[in-house]
Image (cartoon, rainbow, N blue to C red):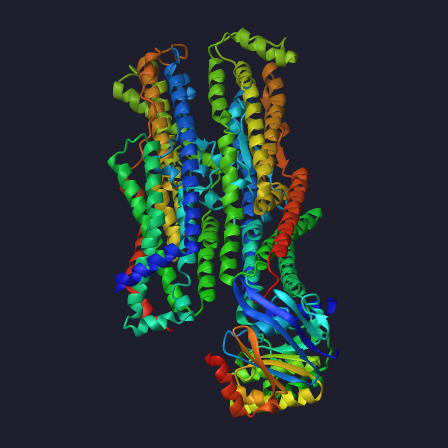
Amino acid sequence: MAFVLEAKNLSKNYQDKQALKPLNLQLQPGEIYSLLGPNGAGKSTTINLFLGFIAPTGGMALINNLEVAQHPVEIKRYLAYIPEQVVLYPNLSGFENLSLLSSLAGFNYDADLLNGFLLRSGLPAEAINMRTGAYSKGMRQKVGIAAALAKRAKVLLLDEPTSGLDPKASNEFSELLLQLSAEGTAVFMATHDIFRAREVSSRIGIMKAGQLVHQLSSNELDAHQLEKLYLNYMHD
Amino acid sequence: MIKTLAQKELVSARRDKRFVLLGAIIVLLLMVAAVSGVVSYNQLSAERTMAQHAADHDFKSQPARHPHRMAHYGSYAFRPKSSLSFFDFGLDTYTGTMVFMEAHQQNSANFSAVQQSGGLLRFGEMTVAFVLQWLIPLLIIFLTFNTFTQEKEQETLKVLLSQGLTVAQIAKAKLQGYAQALALIIVPALLVASLLLLLANGLSADADFLLRLLIFLTAYLVYFFIFLAGSILISALNQHSRSALLLLLGIWIMACVIMPKVTANWGSLLYQTPTKAEMDATVHHAASHGMNGHDPQDKRTAEFTKGLLAKYHVDSVSQLPVNIDGLVMAEGEAYSSKVYAQEFDKLADTYHRQSSVSEWAGLLNPYLAIRYVSMALAGTDAAHYVHFLKAAEDYRYRLAQHLNHLHATQLHYHDKETRLDASNWKNYPAFTYHEPSVAWALGRHLVSVVALLLWGGLLYFFFTRLITQYFTL
Amino acid sequence: MKKALKTLLYTEWLNFKTEKSLLLFALLILLAGGYGIYSGRAEIQRQRANISHLDTLYQDNIAELKAKYPDTADAGDIGYYHAVFATHMPDSWAALSVGQRDANPYYLKLRLVAVHNQLYSSENTNPDKLATGSFDLAFVLVFLLPLFIIAICFNLFSAEKERGTLALVLSQPISLSTFLLGKLLFRFGLVVLLVALLIAAGVLFTGAQADGRVLIWLSATTLYSMFWFGVCYAFIVLKKSSAFNAICLLGVWLLLTIIAPAVINVVSQISQPVTEGMALTLKQREEVHAGWDKPKDETFKRFFAHYPQYRNTSPVTGRFAWKWYFAFQELGDRSVESLYQTYLSKLQSRAELANRLCMVSAPATLQVLLNAAGGTDLQSHLGFVQSARQFHHRLKAYYYPFLFTDKPFLHADYDGEPRHIYQARSDAAAINMAMLTLLAITIIVFVIATIIQCFTTSELK
């Protein structure tokens, strides 16, 4: 019963379209779960359901044993979310954005701690007090990571976290995920990056047309076999 | 090629729910304005015609009287509603409708609607002109603000450009397409409104009236073109729909809401209007002391008497073949009217200068330009009002002098008893007012006419050039 | 929740400091308010100056008459040639809401002759200026403040959504309503602050009396701001695009500030036509001029019925005597009295109808309230005209003894002549009524907004 993220027959319909067919899934602390699948397979829908941004048609999403739909605010204490495009308030500095987000999450960090989170997420020290309007995509994402770090969340939800990052930044990001996982944070991410997924995940799910069609643990296959498997599913 | 594209804009505008809904609202408001305009036009017209007839009847049915009694009994002039006034009430609500015309005294025009209403009137009036001047530009803005920006955001513009089209061609096509779409709403609505106007006018239309109507409609078409071309231009020069919309709405608020008030207030702060009491005192002073201050009334009368005695070779006024009482009064009336006319012209000039701040601002703001052109054509501007007041003053003067003439020729010196026959007033022509011609009307507002044409012309000739020069993807 | 709110407010403050458009709008509204205060003050100052200049005209007129009648005069000549002024003094708050003071005459030139056609004379005013209206502080608050509120609120939610900042913020443990509340509260605070600043500046600069009306202005404009925040909120919770909100909110603004008042006005004018004004002027002329032809005995008989104290004064034998002239002038006035009362009551009921209908429009209601507070509404003008009529009675009471007891009018007698100043006052009943209306419509708007919120999806994507 120590699941920090759980889906029980979770489904979502839009009018006549089934965006997510009933999904069952559990994540334990420290697990890294990657959801693979083409555009429109239902990956983002799943993440939005866990965030409570959309309401499920059937079943339930649970975070830390709390039903998301019932406790839309409460569950956000336990999760951190990094969208594909981290968009910050462009007129505020990275520091100010982080300060806003973490104090909304209910933490009172002093400046040193906040700076520490930003540095740990890999943001260059000289960028901390610059307005984020001038940041690159990678830098903005690092502020998003810092916000997740600062929140000491039990679950990290990631939507295409490495898309658009250069290989170095992407690699640093993987390192960070492994560290967080070692500290007990469960990570749930939607991604297209098969190789990165294979590298960091403990489990991998493949989604197609709203359905979870295959699950495997990452040590079952190497990256090439995984790609073959993935493409097989996509063909038929 | 442009035709195909224009067709595409027209079709997509017609399928746009926004356009259909807003268009319907505007046509509805236009109809409400036209109908309520006709109703109040008929009501006010009937009221004034009846009052004028009653006043004329009263005058004509006076019994035998001493002529000077009749001079004080006086007559009334009611300002008739001009036939186009229901399109644009203009200043009618704020101008007096009834002038009492008596000897020796010029009275103000009283009973304006604004004096008989609460503060609500000041919010504006629901007239055809309001819909045309305020709402249709808004419709144009809503319709076109994202015509370029959306294509930029969705990148369809790149596709079009890659087909070998130039930005100028696309812009022209948009202009044509939207103009056609707008015409679908506006033209039938204006035709119906014009028909209502003709019906309200009893289907009798002279050339001047038709010319006014024609120029009225044309002026508005120019005005709409200015907004349409301007709005498309701004959409082309902006990167985001949001910023284009905000800019356009800001311009609209500035042009229609804020600037007219600022310029009108500024004008009245710059040029001070003399109060009626002050003006009366000035006229009185100038009439009794002479316009130059060294020619008092007594002296003028004495000289006039001396001249008269010499002319008729007699020694005393009682020997004159004419009644000097009437002649002296006629002299006094002529003199004081001259003084009054001079002061009135100064006042009218003050009004004109106050308003000219707004008229010149029309060079910056087409709303102000169309406002004056529209009022001029509807016959509801300050110039027409002043024209009416002058006509009334003219009638007053002639009537007073006619009665003085009777006094001088038919009565004996110092005779206060004799009554002249009733036929004398019965046959005197009643006050009738003739509206000035359309050329006169527009001549008072050349600045506004030029401003409107300049805006239209500049946008017409430089539209594609501006877009080509400043467009960025 | 409390802490989150504080954080949100602080963030908004940081954003406000750096966001140029918000600052620009705030600056614009301050600028417009400043100009409104200035030009309202200039307008009322000019009226005051004109009123005080009337005294010069009055003294000149007396000097002229003294020269014309160097020793004694027949009071009839004085009554006929001498003009006195009834004046309508603006209240100290008039400059902030000029209201109808520019359209209605603020003084009346009165002679002893029949009063009725002296009551409706109008002042020299440029109709063009009247049609455009005054740019006073009331205009800024009634018309421009809502536009300011719309400008800072229309994309309060949609901009965050369209930009993408919403996702990260809402993955924090705060609810959407807390988030919106924080943003709205900040803006509301800003608006109230700006309005309070403008009102304070207005009071200081125009010399408005710092009495209970400061509170009335403040609470009315705060309620009014709340009303517009409510309207904005109703559209925000629909969670549509920024463009949709901008278009709809501007549409609501047009509907409430221009179309609704204009329609109310048309309705009240068409349904309550007031033609008695013209009719009574025409009738009075008939009555007064018929006086010349009626037998003097009959005229006096009717006159003495109202003034028995002059019954035994010397009879008029000649062709003309001033007392006879003024007697039939007064009878002319009395003959149209009932028509005049109808005229007044029709004006009143038209104004009342308009005031009752104006509850559909918060801007109209606020304008009614501000005009009532400054004594610049139609009511105040009607009060002035009423008081001018009483003044005319006082004039008659002063001159009739001279006329009827054949007492010569001496130079010293000019000093005893009654003078008139009517001090405009605020109308508490109208203020209370308008304030209650504002409160009611604000509550209604919030109820509607809440209902809309309940019926819109809570989903964000």
Residue A129, image quadrant: bottom right
Question: Which x, y percent locates residue B112?
Answer: 47, 34
Compared to B403, does C315 lie above or below? above
Q: Is residue A203 above or below residue B239?
A: below
Q: Is residue C268 left or right of residue C91?
A: left
Q: Please state the horizontal and vertical placement of residue B200, each as a whole percent of the image.
A: 35, 32
* Nearest to the observer: residue B50 or residue C4: C4
Residue C177 location (% of width, % of height): 66, 62
Report the side of C8 relative to B129 (left or right). right
Q: Is residue B451 visible?
A: no
Which quarter of the rendering shows the N terminus of chain B?
bottom left
Pick out the residue farthest to the front. Answer: A236
Quarter where residue B453 is shown: bottom left
Q: Residue at x 43, y 55 (%)?
A: B17
Observer-nearest residue: C88 or C53? C88
Query: Would residue B370 be seen by someone viewing this image from the given angle?
Result: yes
Quadrant in the rendering for residue B375 = top left
- Quadrant location of the C terminus of chain B in the rendered image: bottom left
Image side of residue B31 versus residue A67, left or right: left
Q: Residue at x 40, y 27 (%)?
A: B46
Residues B100 and C174: in front is: C174
User: Residue shown at 60%/14% (left/top)?
Assistant: C404
